[in-house]
Image (cartoon, grey):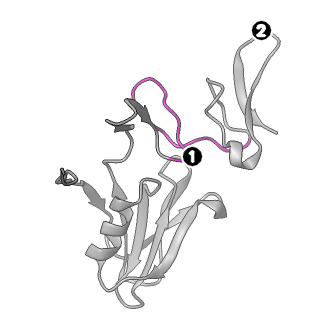
Amino acid sequence: MSSPAHAIYSSTLSLSLQGHEFQPQYGVQLIFNETARSRLLCSAACSQNPSCRIFDYDSSSHRCRLFEADLTNGAIIETASQTSIVGTCQENRYQTCSSTTNTCQCPGNSYWNGSMCPLKLFENTACSQIDACRSDLNLSCIMNSYGEFTQCSR
């Protein structure tokens, strides 16, 4: 009987200066809002969640928020709390592959653009392929009369 393979993973994080938090463009982008004992545990939670691209952590309140967002659809803003910091996860923009099914796929709410897995787009955002828009929000990439994809719409 064979034992399951164990892999060692590494993640690259970028951190903001203290006194900042992340402001998502859409509320649906918040995927986790709990407490964590440390910034390291909050960043590990983001790194281990394939949907997380950015997180913020406040060391006073121990608030840890994970977001399915990046700087194309949200912003790092100053906050009154000088103990709040924003981190971005770099390593989850690529497909994950299964050796048992020999298939690869992007994490949820992202799509393959030919080289990486950017987040799916929101309403009225320019799109260039059919699967680029948030289908969970009933959006699709609309074609114009020339057969070109134009923008995400209902």
Dot 2: what SS? loop
Horizontal and vertical percent for residue 8?
A: 16, 54
**Residue depicted at 48% across the width and 39% down the height:** 118
**Of residues 137 and 83, the one drawn nearer to the viewer in this rendering:** 137
Q: Which residue is mark 1?
A: 109
Vertical order, 67 against 120 (above or below): below
Q: Which of label 1 and label 2 is nearer to you? A: 1
Of residues 70 and 83, the one nearer the viewer is: 70
Mark 1 burial class by Cα count in 10 Å: few <14, some 14-19, many 20+: some
Q: Say which residue appears at 31% left-offset and 48% top-offset.
A: 91
Vertical relation: 29 (above or below) 141: below
User: Magenta segment, which residues?
Assistant: 108-123
Comparing 75 with 111, the one in front is 111
Q: Main secondary structure of the magenta part?
A: loop
Would you say 81 lies left or right of 1 here?
right
Residue type highlighted by circle 2: Tyr
How crowded is the residue under tag 2: few (<14 C-alpha within 10 Å), some, or many (20+)? Answer: few
Instruction: Say if mark 1 contacts mark 2, CB within 8 Å.
Output: no
Q: Is residue 77 visible?
A: no
Q: Secondary structure at mark 1?
A: loop
Earlier in the chain: of badge 1 and badge 2, it is 1
Residue 137 x %, y %? 73, 49
Residue 112, x across and y down, in percent: 49, 31
C-alpha separation, residue under disc 1 versus residue under disc 2: 28 Å
Quadrant of res 100 = top left
Which residue in the protein does label 2 denote? 146
Query: In which image quadrant can residue 130 be found?
Result: top right
